[in-house]
Image: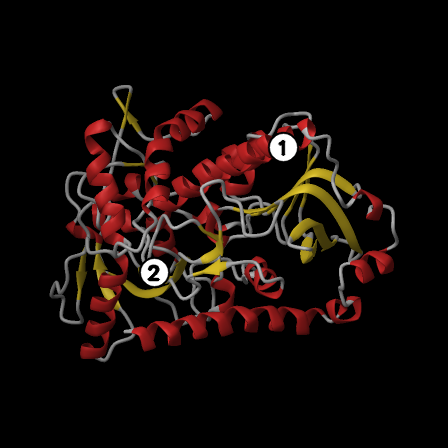
């Protein structure tokens, strides 16, 4: 590992990978993840990825996204995502992503709150297909250094300028690393919840650092609960039963086997219906009936969901599946503009850790993979434009005099308490508390306004 790079990318899900793939080969890039390389939530996305089917679908796609987000979305961001969708899909296919095809044409499916079929998919593991394909492309790049079990501890920043990060290597060494641009693609906040579909190590570290360093955040209380995760008594990451299952015709049933809701409601509204039914029935879950799906073989369409059910003693071709809502997705985050640039110079954020306004108060199903890819690409483009401007003006990075300083000198320069960072348990809890405090503050502020 070097002391200086052109770009540092924290996270290696779809946002991190797509960002790296859109930077030229002469850029020296460091990518890090604090767990295994394959343990990003991008791998867990089951349903699919939205795309503008044709020009006639634009208005409906826009309205579906706005309606699901309770019209709190930033319109310019929604337009950016939709208008960029086809070019992103074309790139994914060129990289080798294997979307479902029939007679040489892409197959589109539908999920809750969509007015038409506009979702591309690969079995019931679309996120894994896209992320693994992009990751393999990144691994081929000679200019990218990819490190696992390497954790970002703090940002190196002063005067509203981010110069790099302080990280801890797999061997436990704390090291400062500088870069002209930093992209935070660290995922969501499921790790701060008891019940979540997210990997437990995703604890909102980037958000906590944004709060510590007065970087603008937005809507941290906008947290999406997924209506249907597989119910278990075990304390573990909840297994997602994709919305596509309901999109294909599965029904929700109460304790007596009666259908009680419109399964294609937006996620937040359907979650309320399920929780209301659970309260009425005095149960810990409701039932999902995949046997109601007609005209397709669920073993072929949803092989991994069926496999998970069978492993837990339930045959979805003959029995109902126990499902319960759980924390799933984070619509708020570090505030970014259309270029995925934060309120701090040279600092970008993309994917679930940021808030570009696409989702509003509630995410429309299968917009997340698309949104992450579109805005990560925008970040890379803006970095290159910034470098051109700096070159024309004859400017060099302001951090250059600090690169060869000792760790203690750098810590003093950036006002970092190394002793405090060394207490890992205290730091992790403090970062979680920062995020929770802001969520609670925004929730209370929202309640007072209403």
Question: Height in image: 104 above or below 167?
Answer: above
**Which residue is situated farthest in the left direction here?**
258
Q: Within the image, what quadrant is residue 210 found in?
A: bottom right
Report, in whole angstroms, how far the alpha carbon at label 2 lies from the one at label 1. 33 Å
Classify the position of the N terminus by image quarter.
Answer: top right
Residue 140 position within the rendered picture, expressed as x and y whole percent measured from the top left: 63, 28
Question: Height in image: 383 above or below 207?
Answer: above
Checking the image for residue 229, the label placed there is 2
In the displayed structure, does residue 257 sit left or right of residue 99?
left
Mark 1 and mark 2 in contact (Cβ < 8 Å)?
no
Residue 220 position within the rendered picture, expressed as x and y whole percent measured from the top left: 44, 64
Q: Within the image, what quadrant is residue 159 found in?
A: bottom right
Q: Count every numbered label the image shows and give the total.
A: 2
SS of the residue at dot 1?
Answer: helix
Examine the rendering and report whether any part of residue 124 can be seen: no
Crowd rating for badge 1 (residues with CA inside 10 Å; few <14, some 14–19, many 20+)? few
Residue at position x 80%, y 56% from top?
A: 173
In the displayed structure, does residue 275 sit left or right of residue 173?
left
In the displayed structure, does residue 335 sit left or right of residue 401?
left
Q: Nearer the viewer, mark 2 or mark 1?
A: 1
Residue at position x 63%, y 32% from top?
A: 139
Residue position for label 1: 139
SS of the residue at dot 2?
Answer: strand
Residue 48 position within the rendered picture, expressed as x and y whole percent measured from the top left: 34, 41
Crowd rating for badge 2 (residues with CA inside 10 Å; few <14, some 14–19, many 20+)? many
Between 268 and 396, the residue placed more toward the observer is: 396
């Amino acid at each position: 590992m070097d002391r200086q790079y052109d770009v540092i990318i924290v996270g290696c899900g779809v946002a991190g990978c797509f960002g790296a793939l859109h930077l030229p080969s002469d850029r020296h890039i460091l990518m890090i993840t604090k767990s295994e390389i394959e343990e990003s939530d991008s791998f867990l996305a089951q349903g699919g990825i939205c795309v503008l089917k044709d020009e006639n679908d634009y208005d409906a796609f826009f309205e579906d996204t706005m309606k699901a987000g309770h019209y709190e979305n930033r319109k310019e961001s929604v337009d950016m995502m939709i208008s960029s969708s086809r070019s992103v899909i074309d790139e994914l296919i060129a990289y080798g992503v294997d979307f479902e095809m029939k007679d040489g044409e892409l197959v589109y499916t539908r999920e809750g709150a969509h007015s038409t079929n506009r979702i591309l998919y690969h079995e019931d593991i679309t996120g894994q297909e896209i992320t693994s394909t992009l990751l393999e492309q990144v691994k081929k790049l000679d200019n990218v250094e990819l490190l696992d079990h390497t954790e970002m501890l703090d940002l190196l920043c002063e005067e509203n300028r981010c110069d790099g990060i302080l990280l801890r290597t797999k061997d436990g060494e704390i090291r400062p690393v500088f870069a002209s641009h930093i992209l935070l693609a660290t995922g969501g906040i499921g790790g701060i919840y008891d019940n979540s579909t997210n990997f437990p190590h995703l604890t909102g570290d980037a958000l906590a650092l944004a709060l510590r360093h007065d970087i603008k955040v937005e809507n941290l209380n906008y947290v999406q609960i997924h209506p249907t995760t597989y119910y278990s008594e075990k304390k573990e990451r909840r297994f997602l039963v994709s919305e596509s299952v309901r999109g294909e015709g599965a029904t929700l049933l109460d304790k007596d086997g009666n259908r009680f809701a419109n399964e294609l409601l937006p996620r937040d509204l359907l979650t309320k219906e399920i929780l209301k039914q659970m309260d009425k029935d005095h149960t810990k879950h409701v039932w999902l009936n995949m046997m109601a799906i007609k005209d397709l073989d669920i073993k072929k369409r949803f092989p991994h969901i069926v496999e998970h059910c069978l492993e837990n003693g339930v045959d979805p071709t003959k029995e109902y599946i126990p499902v319960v809502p759980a924390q799933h997705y984070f619509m708020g985050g570090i505030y970014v503009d259309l270029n995925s640039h934060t309120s701090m110079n040279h600092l970008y954020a993309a994917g679930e850790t940021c808030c570009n306004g696409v989702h509003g108060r509630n995410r429309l199903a299968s917009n997340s993979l698309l949104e992450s890819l579109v805005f990560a690409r925008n970040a890379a483009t803006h970095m290159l434009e910034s470098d051109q401007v700096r070159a024309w003006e004859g400017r060099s990075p302001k951090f250059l005099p600090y690169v060869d300083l000792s760790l203690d000198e750098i810590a003093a320069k950036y006002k970092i308490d190394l002793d405090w960072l060394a207490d890992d348990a205290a730091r992790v809890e403090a970062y979680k508390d920062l995020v929770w405090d802001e969520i609670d503050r925004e929730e209370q502020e929202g309640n007072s306004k209403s």
